[in-house]
Image (cartoon, rainbow, N blue to C red):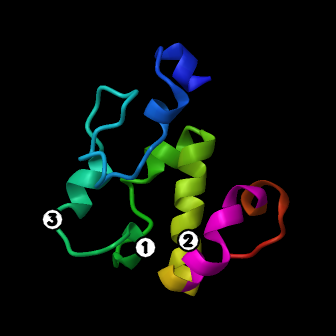
Amino acid sequence: MIAGVHNLSTDEIKCKGCRAEDGQCAHLAMECRVYKCIEKTDMKTCAECKDFPCEYLHPYSDQAMKPHNTKVFNLCRIKNIGIEKWAKEEAGDILDKYFYGTWSL
């Protein structure tokens, strides 16, 4: 839906991550505040930050948009089980788990 609104292909609209996109979303004119924060650190994800979750993530989760909600959900899972275990065991089916699975944080 977002791709159609912005006249972009589905590949162009997919977020490849703040660092890969240099903090610029293909469909948003604004700069990513999360990227501005984390680019100054050597952290792999926001889950490593002592302030996680912080207000920088709030606008994304508050808009109730699936990709951003799952971003915060993924970061919570990474914080709880570690990035290696998350990547090996959960990354492939995270959308199904988020929307239809049973889980606890």
Give the residue displayed 59% in from the left and 74% down from the top. Answer: 77
Residue 87 position within the rendered picture, expressed as x and y whole percent measured from the top left: 56, 75
Horizontal arrangement in the rendering, residue 53 relative to residue 49 (left or right): right
Residue 10 position within the rendered picture, expressed as x and y whole percent measured from the top left: 54, 30
Q: Are marks 1 and 2 in contact (CB under 8 Å)?
A: yes
Amino acid type at circle 3 is: Lys
In space, the residues marked 1 and 3 are separated at their CA atoms by 15 Å
Which residue has dot 2 on it?
76
Horizontal arrangement in the rendering, residue 2 relative to residue 25 (left or right): right
The quarter in which the N terminus is drawn is top right
What secondary structure is found at the residue carrying circle 3? loop
Amino acid type at circle 1 is: Ala
Amino acid type at circle 2 is: Cys
Earlier residue among tags 1 and 3 = 3
The span picked out in magenta is 85-96
In space, the residues marked 1 and 2 are separated at their CA atoms by 7 Å
The correct choice, above or below, for 71 with respect to 83 in the image is: above
What secondary structure is found at the residue carrying circle 2? helix
Which residue has dot 3 on it?
40
Give the residue displayed 63% in from the left and 43% down from the top. Answer: 66
Query: Is 52 in front, or is 15?
Result: 15
Residue 30 position within the rendered picture, expressed as x and y whole percent measured from the top left: 28, 31
Horizontal arrangement in the rendering, residue 51 relative to residue 87 (left or right): left
Give the residue displayed 20% in from the left and 61% down from the top. Answer: 39
**Disc 3 crowd, CA 10 A, few/some/many (<14, 14-19, 20+):** few
**Disc 2 crowd, CA 10 A, few/some/many (<14, 14-19, 20+):** some
Tell me the tag on residue 47. 1
Give the residue displayed 51% in from the left and 84% down from the top. Answer: 84
Assess whether residue 36 is covered by the magenta stretch: no
The correct choice, above or below, for 27 with respect to 55 in the image is: above
Residue 104 position within the rendered picture, expressed as x and y whole percent measured from the top left: 74, 76
Earlier residue among tags 2 and 3 = 3
